Each structure stands twice: as structure tokens, then as C-alpha cells.
Image (spheres, rainbow, N blue to C red):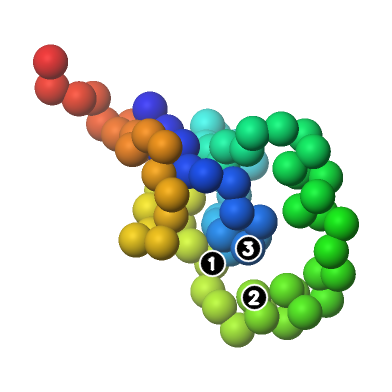
């Protein structure tokens, strides 16, 4: 089961993306309006800020994340 983390564009842009497998984390938003609102900004300053940061592993959960569901990252949970 994957992690479900609250939508945060900066956090998403730092997360490594695996195109050939199921994602280990999904970012959840409330509506398309939230998505459209988040993408109406100037990304130049964001790109500059992110350039100095490293990519996060797909399964990473940060202390600053708003975790909606903590996944098992492919491990089966005990019954």
C-alpha cells in the first residue's frame, strides 16, 4: 500500500518519480480548483529554490508531511 500525503507542490517536485512501477507515495488534494490554484504561480523562483535541494526517494515520508495514510511500501502488514 502506498503513502498518501497531503498535496504540496514543492514537496511533489522534490520527489523521485518511477515511471515503470506503481508509486510508493500519492499526493492527495481536495479538488481540481486546488490544483489549478497551485499552478497559477511563477515557478522560476521555485525552480531556483529546488535546484539546491536533492531529490527525495519515492517512499520518503518527511516530518513536515501531512500524512493522510502511512503505507507499507510493498511490505505486507501483519494481521
- In x, y percent, where is residue 43? 81, 69
On the image, numbered disc 2 is attached to which residue?
50
Q: Quadrant of residue 67?
A: top left
Between label 3 and label 2, give the one nearer the viewer.
3
Give the left or right position of residue 27, taking residue 76 as reference: right
Tell me if mark 2 has few (under 14), some (14-19) or many (20+) residues whose alpha carbon lies within 10 angstroms of its own: some
Q: Earlier in the sequence, mark 1 or mark 2?
A: 2
Residue in the picture at 54% in, 67% down: 55
- In x, y percent, where is residue 76? 23, 25
**Label number found at residue 7:** none
Give the left or right position of residue 37, taking residue 20 as reference: right
**Label number found at residue 55:** 1
SS assignment at label 1: loop
On the image, numbered disc 3 is attached to which residue?
10
Tell me if mark 1 has few (under 14), some (14-19) or many (20+) residues whose alpha carbon lies within 10 angstroms of its own: some
CA distance for labels 1 and 2? 9 Å
50 over 61 or under it: above or below: below
Residue in the picture at 26% in, 31% down: 75
Marks 3,2: beta carbons within 8 A = yes
CA distance for labels 3 and 2? 8 Å
The reply to whether residue 25 is visible in this rendering is no
Q: Earlier in the sequence, mark 3 or mark 2?
A: 3
Give the left or right position of residue 18, taking residue 77 as reference: right
CA distance for labels 1 and 3? 11 Å
Marks 1,2: beta carbons within 8 A = no
Amino acid at each position: 500500500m502506498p503513502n498518501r500525503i497531503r498535496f504540496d507542490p514543492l514537496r511533489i517536485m522534490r520527489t523521485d518519480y518511477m515511471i515503470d512501477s506503481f508509486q510508493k507515495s500519492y499526493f492527495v488534494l481536495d479538488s481540481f480548483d486546488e490544483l489549478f490554484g497551485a499552478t497559477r504561480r511563477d515557478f522560476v523562483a521555485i525552480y531556483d529554490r529546488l535546484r539546491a535541494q536533492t531529490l527525495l526517494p519515492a517512499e520518503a515520508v518527511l516530518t513536515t508531511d501531512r500524512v493522510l495514510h502511512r503505507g507499507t511500501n510493498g511490505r505486507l502488514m501483519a494481521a
